[in-house]
Image: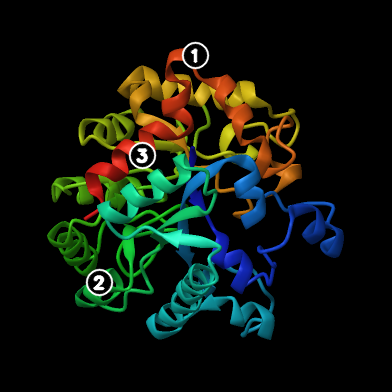
Amino acid sequence: MYIDGHLDLAFNAVVHKRDLTRSVKAVRADEERTHQELLVTLPELRRAQVGIVFGTLFAIPRTALQYEGDAPPKWKAKLSYATPDEAHALAVDQLERYEQWEEEGRIRILRSQSDLQSHVAAWEGGDRTTGLVVLMEGADPIRTPDELTWWVDRGLRMVGPAWRSTRYAGGTGAPGPLTPAGKDLVRAMIAHGIPLDVSHLSNESFWDAMDLDPQHVLASHSNARAINPGDRQMSDDMIRAVGASGGVVGIVLGDVFLHPDHETQPVALRDVRRHAEHIASLIGWDQVAVGSDFDGGFGVQETPEELSRGADFSKLGKVAPAAARSGFLGGNWLRFLRRVLP
């Protein structure tokens, strides 16, 4: 059973109106795209033998959108938020889509150790229903730190405070420390045992969060800054800090995150291997995994040339040594979940 540590499934379904209950081939035929061509649907995950995903709740801050004039076009306004209430509503819509898929028997939302144990047993018995752990990417939908309790009761099990900047933290391309509310949110996460996803956190916010001694830490989809410079990737010291916490770093598979010259140079699995090997040299192969972010703003044309659909997931095993392959493709995330789920 393979595990993918980062997929924006509900965002693609709710915001981009992609019917992820259909085959990849069918959705591609309808869209007729020449870029960001779809890689993943629910049937494709089964075909790929991806048995668990970390499925995100992801809302785009309106300040991150490009538009002319004083107000965005209506379609951009609908997919973004300008207030905490709007962010909350967008994330709830996505959570309800996961709940709908669960009611239809298309996925299992894994909320507890019992759920995880039952899911693994069912998978080993031949049931290829995908398990999903709910992860929030960018915490603005949590309108106040006290509201985290409500989200946890609804099944939220991991939180990344930032994407760009949020009310809680500095993020990619938007440096800054944790805000007072951000520190309160991390403290609330610690109290609830909710893992901190450090992907997208700015340098200052990362170290502020680590100073609060979070109980569980992961980087769901992050690569090595030593190979591809920029604040979207993690420095060696950040990687070591995640490793020291017992966390796992998931390699993200967009060309832009893998190679600094991705616009002029072909990107391939050898580039994934460079990042994986570098991170493993710092924290060990048992703390490196996959957080593909397939269809998270990039698709077939923007991923390594060997990957043409989600069912190519197994090809990622080539980047790890034989002894580390099963852990890299899923075992390391599974061990993490066995430690952090309630």
Which mark, by number, is residue 334? 3
Which mark, by number, is residue 48? none
Report whether 44 appears left or right of 176: right
* In the foreground, 263 or 319: 319
Q: Secondary structure at mark 2?
A: helix
Residue type marked 3: Leu
Measuring from the top left, give residue 108's x and y in whole percent. Answer: 45, 60
Q: Secondary structure at mark 1?
A: helix
Which mark, by number, is residue 148? 2
Measuring from the top left, give residue 96's x and y in whole percent. Answer: 47, 76
Q: CA distance from mark 3 to mark 1?
A: 18 Å
Q: Secondary structure at mark 3?
A: helix
**In the rendered structure, which disc, 3 or 1, sits on the residue that comes first in sequence?**
1
Is residue 248 in view from this perspective? Answer: yes
Is residue 226 in view from this perspective? Answer: no
**In the rendered structure, which disc, 2 or 1, sits on the residue that comes first in sequence?**
2
Residue type marked 1: Ala
